[in-house]
Amino acid sequence: MTPAELRALPPGTRVVVRYRLHGDSHGATDALGDLIAVGPEACTVATRRGEVVIAIADIVAAKTVPPAPERRPR
């Protein structure tokens, strides 16, 4: 998905965004959650661990994903 396609998604869409890491660990990681916002420089994804702000230039890939499965009661 291109940055333009990501910008076209409505807030609340469930996405996974793979992005480059900087610093000591030169790799990539994923942010899985609800898309909060997409601006000209960055996008924000609400994950289970909190909001992740990702620079558009660091995005390697992105796609929409189905809703999370319902948690089973114990």
Image (cartoon, helix red, strand yellow):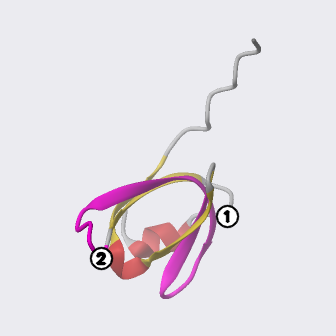
Which residue appears at 67% of the width and 64% of the height?
Answer: 11
Asked where in the image residue 35 lies, by quadrant, the reply is bottom right
First in sequence, mark 2 or 1: give its number: 1
Q: Which mark is residue 34?
A: none
Mark 2, secondary structure of its residue: loop
- Could you tell me if the residues under marks 2 and 1 are in contact, i.e. CB atoms within 8 Å? no
Which percent across, then down, holds residue 23? Answer: 29, 76
Amino acid under disc 1: Pro
Give the side of residue 69 with respect to residue 22, left or right.
Answer: right
The C terminus lies in quadrant: top right
Which residue appears at 50% of the width and 43% of the height?
Answer: 65
Which residue appears at 24% of the width and 62% of the height?
Answer: 27
**Distance from the alpha carbon under mark 2 to that under mark 1:** 30 Å
Number of numbered discs present? 2
Q: Which residues are magenta?
A: 22-46
Residues packed near mark 2 inside 10 Å, few (<14), some (14 to 19) or many (20 plus): few
Asked where in the image residue 29 lies, by quadrant, the reply is bottom left
Which percent across, then down, holds residue 66? Answer: 55, 38
Give the side of residue 72 with respect to residue 14, left or right.
Answer: right
Residues packed near mark 1 inside 10 Å, few (<14), some (14 to 19) or many (20 plus): some
Taking 25 as reference, is 66 above or below it?
above
> Which one is nearer the viewer's eye here, 46 or 1?
46
Which percent across, then down, holds residue 46? Answer: 63, 59
Q: Which residue is disc 1 drawn over? A: 11
Eye-nearest disc, 2 or 1? 2
Which percent across, then down, holds residue 67? Answer: 61, 38
> Which one is nearer the viewer's eye here, 43 or 9?
43
Q: Is-magenta flag for residue 36?
A: yes
Q: Which residue is disc 2 drawn over? A: 23
